[in-house]
Image: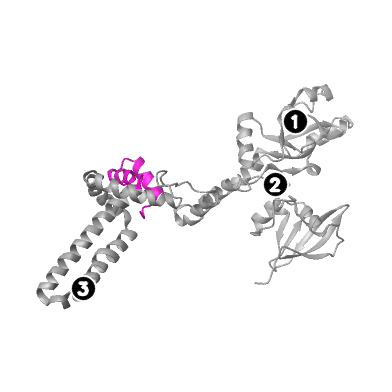
Amino acid sequence: MTLNRYRLQHLAKGKHAGALRAQKLLQRPDRLIGLILLGNNFVNILASSIATVIALRLWGEAGIAIAAGALTLVILIFSEVTPKTLAAVNPEKLAFPAALIYTPLLKLLYPLVWVVNLIANKLLKLIGTDVSGGQDDALSHEELRTVVVEAGVLIPQKHQKMLLNILDMESATVEDIMIPRGEIVGVDLDNHWDDILKKISKTPYTRIPVYKKSIDKIIGVLHLRKALGLLTDETFDKERLTQCLSEPYFIPEATSLHKQLFNFQNEKMRIAFVVDEYGDIMGAVTLEDLLEEIVGEFTTDPSDNSQEIQRQKDGGYLVEASVTIRELNKITGWSLPTDGPKTLNGLILEYLETIPKPGTSLKLLSQPLEVIQTQGNAVKLVRFYPTSP
């Protein structure tokens, strides 16, 4: 009963004879327990009867108490505590050889075990317990996280972090990691042609959206590799630029990260535009953004969040308020809520229900902070002070 079920499944897949027998026995734990307790109680009662007879012949009725005390001590030490502790510490060493005995013994005593189990199972059903369904070994999301964390030296720390990041992708959406609408770098076809060429030649990104007047009117995505070779061509104009575009790919804001990763693979896309329920552009997410959620930062993206969150000498943080709460939690180890606003600016505005002025101090879920700078209708820069231990 103390066997590691997942190690047992692993050994059984490798055709380990002892593991296969033990796994078959554990498929019906009620029968296994019935067999063990049947033999256990039979031996204990038989030993008590023999000890009583011997005690009566040697010491008379006074010997019954002596025999009861001595037998209790012997059974407790040699039949209960010692062997069961040994089995709990080294379950495989005892379980696999024991399964070799239990398997034929169960067949031999099956009629008796069946009767005992029938009565016991009927009683269990009266209290709402059904043993016929077997044991559910499936792990929940949080239990699986615990398994990964507790693996310790069995999994390198870097790999452990990657596995935890993969598990977290199930509960996060593209809205949590997207590039906000206001930070999307794109080309407006209504601009002067010289301005368009200048933006294309100086953009640090490989793929940029092309739109007319508003980012909500994206007509395609330009791959810089297709355009750079044409920049020196005198015949290169807006019409030829439009011919280089690929179809834009739109996704709902509630799409989970792990699902979007598979969508990118199936659609052969590397960038998607996040839209709300009205079809308006909320932001953009790239394949690189999703991969960085698993393996960590590996690009020189100028919007790298590590530059937006700077640890101070006193243990506090200087943070750009446009950073996502998810990224802030990941770097600081805090647990700021992610089920509401997705950015620190949004969380502060929701908490205060007004646009704060520079110098405003508040305590955001036990984290003291001061608004250092605002810009327009948004908080720009925030300083988090270290919390007292």
Q: Residue at x 29, y 44 (%)?
A: 21
- Where residue 308 sits, quadrant-wise, is bottom right
Majority secondary structure of magenta residues: helix
- Asked if residue 36 lies in the magenta stretch, the reply is no
From the image, state whether disc 1 or disc 3 is nearer to you: 3
Q: Nearer the viewer, mark 2 or mark 3?
A: 3
Q: Quadrant of the N terminus?
A: bottom left
Residues rendered magenta in the picture: 1-28
The answer to which quarter of the image holds residue 299 is top right
Q: Nearer the viewer, residue 320 or 135?
A: 135
Mark 1 highlights which residue? 221
- Circle 2 packing at 10 Å, graded few (<14), some (14-19), many (20+), is many
Q: Amino acid at mark 3?
A: Ala
Q: Can residue 20 be seen?
A: yes
Tell me: residue 232, above or below residue 343.
above
Name the amino acid, label 1. Answer: Val
In 3D space, how far apart are the residues under numbered discs 1 and 2 (Cα atoms)?
23 Å
